Image (cartoon, rainbow, N blue to C red):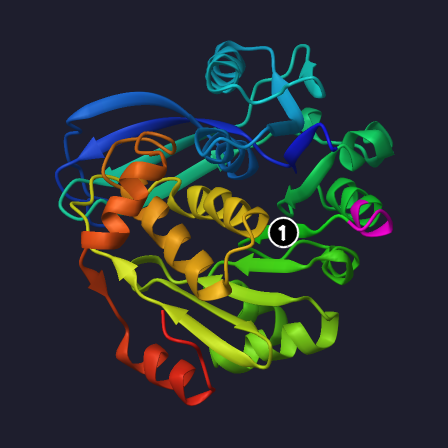
Amino acid sequence: MPEFDVVGVGLNATDTLLMVPHFPAYAGKVPFDAEVMSPGGQVASAMVACARLGLRAKYIGTVGDDERGRIQMESLRSTGVNLDHVQLRKGCPNQSAYIIVDRSTGERTVLWRRDDCLRIDPGEIADDQITGARLLHIDGHDTPAVAHAAAIARRHGIPVTVDVDTIYHGFDRVLPNVDYLVASSEFPGNWTGIRDPFEALESLQIEYGMKVAAMTLGAHGALARTGGHFIYAAAYVVDCVDTTGAGDVFHGAFCYAVLQGMTMPAALDFSNAMAALNCTAMGARGGIRGLDEIRLLMARGERRSNPDFAARAQASGSPAV
């Protein structure tokens, strides 16, 4: 039996959240209400979500040896995520972000920095670091390293999920070894040059042969193509405090759903619910909830649907969500 349910290779970050009554106009000035330092990062936060759901999760990445790095490591340790192959880089600042959160909407604007001293080298990832898990989750930033990890997983029959929000040089070497692509709403169109999201996802799936090609849609839910048809899952309506980390938590929930063998409609619905709950508190991991609260929202929560996406998915022969 594998030692871990899921291993993640990719980014972590320590955020400074600045809460403002409303986002300032260009060249404007507004007072901020609160300043909060909070751990985050795409793959690290997804692993925290997995651990919160009861999975045996392991994080592989690099952390700086400054105060932000210390905060990140303490957060990961406290959640039970395995850190055996996290590298502490001496004399290197941890990845940081300054995030301006608009209290009136919960939407955020991110300014981030990651020094090159945090780069993960492919040679630092050995086969046994990947093969000890049932699932591999990656992002796209250190592309040669995640490509190497995905290739290891493919050779050993381990499914790969990927969270990608922008175009990275060399990412074409990653995609052939991906089973579940869950991208931002912008990535499919930017990668393929096809503006229509349905056509862009279809093009990606056909070209690279992944089992599922999907995108998150923020306040409108998620869209996926699998089995020759599209599935649209509406978003949940919550009292949104901060959208930071919602996508990362969605990916953690999606990893859990895949490992649980959920149908794709159920997987998207479950992931939408966990992501929505994370938006009800400050910080990238502030609103991560467990199974009971997720199921309660799924049973009683109000959904916000995009009629165009829903209609087109249904026309493709989609199962109901």
Against 213, is 229 above or below? below
Q: Which residue is mark 1?
A: 161
Q: In terms of secondary structure, where does tag 1 sit?
A: strand
Q: Residue 86 placed where, x, y %?
A: 68, 20
Q: Residue 311 placed where, x, y %?
A: 34, 84
Side (left or right) of 130 relative to 261: right
Q: Is residue 154 magenta?
A: yes
Magenta stretch?
A: 153-157
Side (left or right) of 96 relative to 9: left
Q: Amino acid at mark 1?
A: Thr
Against 141, is 90 above or below? above
Q: Residue 234 placed where, x, y %?
A: 31, 65
Dot 1: few (<14), some (14–19), or many (≥20) neighbours within 10 Å?
Answer: many
Q: Is residue 303 magenta?
A: no
Given residues 314 and 17, the one toward you in this image is 314
Against 206, is 259 above or below? above
The quarter in which the N terminus is drawn is: top right
Question: What residue is at 13 percent from the left and 45 percent from the top?
Answer: 104
Given residues 156 and 162, the one toward you in this image is 156
Side (left or right) of 215 relative to 117: left
Residue closest to the far bottom = 315
Q: Residue 17 placed where, x, y %?
A: 31, 29
Question: What residue is at 73 percent from the left and 75 percent from the top?
Answer: 207
Most frequent secondary structure within the magenta stretch: helix
